[in-house]
Amino acid sequence: MRGLIVDTTVKKAYVAAFDGEKSSVVYLHDGVSTASALVPAVRDVLAALDLRNEDLDGVSAVVGPGSFTGIRIGVTFINAFAFAFGIPRFSITAFDIMRALRPEAPAYAVDAGHDSFYASFTTDVGSEDRNAASAEMPQDTLYQESVLPDLPRGALLVVYRAITQHVHSLCAPSYVTDLLRPYYMRKSQAERMKEQHV
């Protein structure tokens, strides 16, 4: 299995690729997660594994939650890349990555600013995603900030599993989609301001 992941939802954006057990990660410069920065990063991460674009079995972007601009950049880039090369797209969230790193956590949290979080709470029937104040977060919550260096490893685990399930079983659960869509857990500031003036 060979795959590519783009995560522009975090401050230290990265591109990761794998070819079976081998993997490679390239970090973008802090604060620079633009489409023009992604092109050389993808080239470098694939070259490190001696892969071409056409060799990939699937590509993925982290669709959120996270930076509004970052989400749009990653989703748009991977949608265009997958369309250009006819490669299946796999949609994953920051919560999927954290869950892969520590599946036993009662909740997963991404900083949303103003003492609040985008959070995914583990429930008896799966999970519940919602905005939450810091006081609502249970003990042993896994905070994204605490696992930043491990995010590429978690993303590689999730996407490898998704591609493998998609390829080897038509009925297996999969993250594959026709078109990646951003996962915003709250409206943008522009949308909120527009609603206030209507």
Image: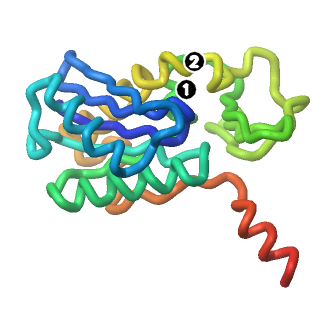
- Residue 157 or 29: which is nearer the viewer? 29
Quadrant location of residue 167? top left
Mark nearer the N terminus (2 vs 1): 1
Q: Which residue is drawn at 73% across and 21% down?
A: 141
Q: Residue at x 48, y 24 (%)?
A: 151
Q: 196 above or below 167?
A: below
Mark 1 surroundings: few (<14), some (14-19) or many (≥20) residues within 10 A: many
- Residue extending farthest to the bottom is 198
Quadrant of the snapshot with the N terminus: top left
Task: Provide residue 8's location: percent of width, then percent of height.
Answer: 47, 41
Q: Which residue is drawn at 37% across and 43% down?
A: 173
Quadrant location of residue 142? top right
Task: Provide residue 111's location: percent of width, then percent of height.
Answer: 71, 34
Q: Residue at x 66, y 29 (%)?
A: 108
Q: Name the residue beneath numbered marker 2.
A: 147
Judged left or right of residue 75, residue 53 is left
Task: Provide residue 133's location: percent of width, then percent of height.
Answer: 86, 37
Quadrant of the snapshot with the C terminus: bottom right
For the residues bearing labels 2 and 1, Cβ distance under 8 angstroms: yes
Secondary-structure class at tag 1: helix
Q: How is the image coloured?
A: rainbow
Q: Which amino acid does label 2 sit on?
A: Val
Q: What residue type is labelled 1?
A: Met
Secondary-structure class at tag 2: helix
Q: Name the residue beneath numbered marker 1.
A: 98
Mark 2 surroundings: few (<14), some (14-19) or many (≥20) residues within 10 A: some
User: Mark 2, mark 1: which one is toward the viewer?
Assistant: 2
Quadrant location of residue 184? bottom right
